[in-house]
Amino acid sequence: MKSSQYLVGKKVSFFGDSITTFTGYSVKNNVYPTSDVKAVDQTWWKQIIDKTGATLGVNNSIGASAISNPEWLTTANSLLTRIQDLPTDTDLCVILMGINDFRGGVGIGTYDPTKAKFLPGYFADAVCTAMVNLHQQCPNARFVWVTPLGDYTNTGTFPSLGKNSNGNTVWDFADVIIKAAQFYGNEVIDTRYCFSNLTTNCFFDGLHPNALGMEKLSNFILNKIYNILG
């Protein structure tokens, strides 16, 4: 059985949006947007590094960024344009993104990993492109995709059931990630089954985890990674 320090000597990198940012640690020096997460050690991703003994490769997280690259998004903020920044010696890469694709009303498109051409403005195509390009960038790394957290800003609906401007739910976006990960041989941590732990009191604004939410999220992801690595 592995000890708690089961990633000692391993380089772990992260791709994310504002939920994974912190001043001095994320790629654009973003400040995590809540007053009660004041130290980097409180963030979900840093807790994973600290609790497993891993070495941080890069935290390539940018607030308001998306996986896809629709016309309204600054190109540099798309995951698709940041993949080359992943250190080639990364052992494990964790990606927690997708909520801004959902909130921005990005079209999901038709999921078909066998199609000849992918269009980066559609979520399904962007996810497939990202998985292919990430593996090309780091062929020896393991990739773990975390499905986007529910949007608690609309308190009248369960987080997974609120719909965006296209009539899609967060779960619709999660379904794409899960299907693509199965096709490309990536791992998935499905946060839809984390809702019993991540309730409204875990978010300071309905979208970003507070200190309590960060701790619960990190524990949830840690347990899943432990099982994934076997």
Image (spheres, grey):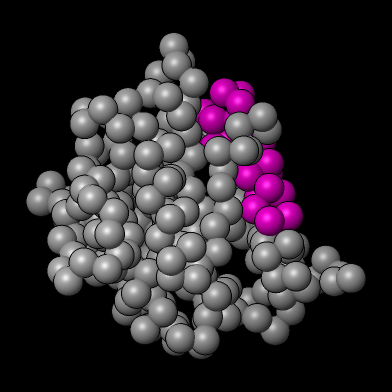
Query: Is 201 a magenta residue?
Result: yes
Front in this rendered view, residue 124 or 38: 124
Q: Is residue 61 left or right of residue 109?
A: right
User: Residue drawn 12% across and 47% down?
Assistant: 72
Q: Is residue 129 above or below residue 101?
A: below
Front in this rendered view, residue 106 or 216: 106
- Quarter of the image with the C terminus in it: bottom right
User: Residue drawn 30% across and 65% down?
Assistant: 113
Q: Position of residue 43 (x, y in %)?
A: 59, 51
Whether residue 182 is visible here, answered yes or no, is yes
Q: Position of residue 53 (x, y in %)?
A: 74, 72
User: Residue drawn 43% across and 66% down?
Assistant: 183
Q: Residue furthest right?
A: 1
Whether residue 56 is visible here, answered yes or no, is no
Front in this rendered view, residue 201 or 179: 179
Q: Is residue 58 above or below residue 170?
A: below
Front in this rendered view, residue 130 or 203: 130
The image quarter in which residue 21 lies: bottom left
Magenta-tinted stretch: 198-224
User: Residue drawn 54% across and 30% down?
Assistant: 203
The image quarter in which residue 229 lies: bottom right
Q: Position of residue 197 (x, y in %)?
A: 68, 33
Q: Is residue 35 left or right of residue 18?
A: right
Q: Position of residue 151 (x, y in %)?
A: 43, 30
Q: Is residue 89 left or right of residue 229?
A: left
Query: Is 133 a magenta residue?
Result: no
- Quarter of the image with the N terminus in it: bottom right
Q: Is residue 50 above or below residue 212?
A: below
Q: Main secondary structure of the magenta part?
A: helix
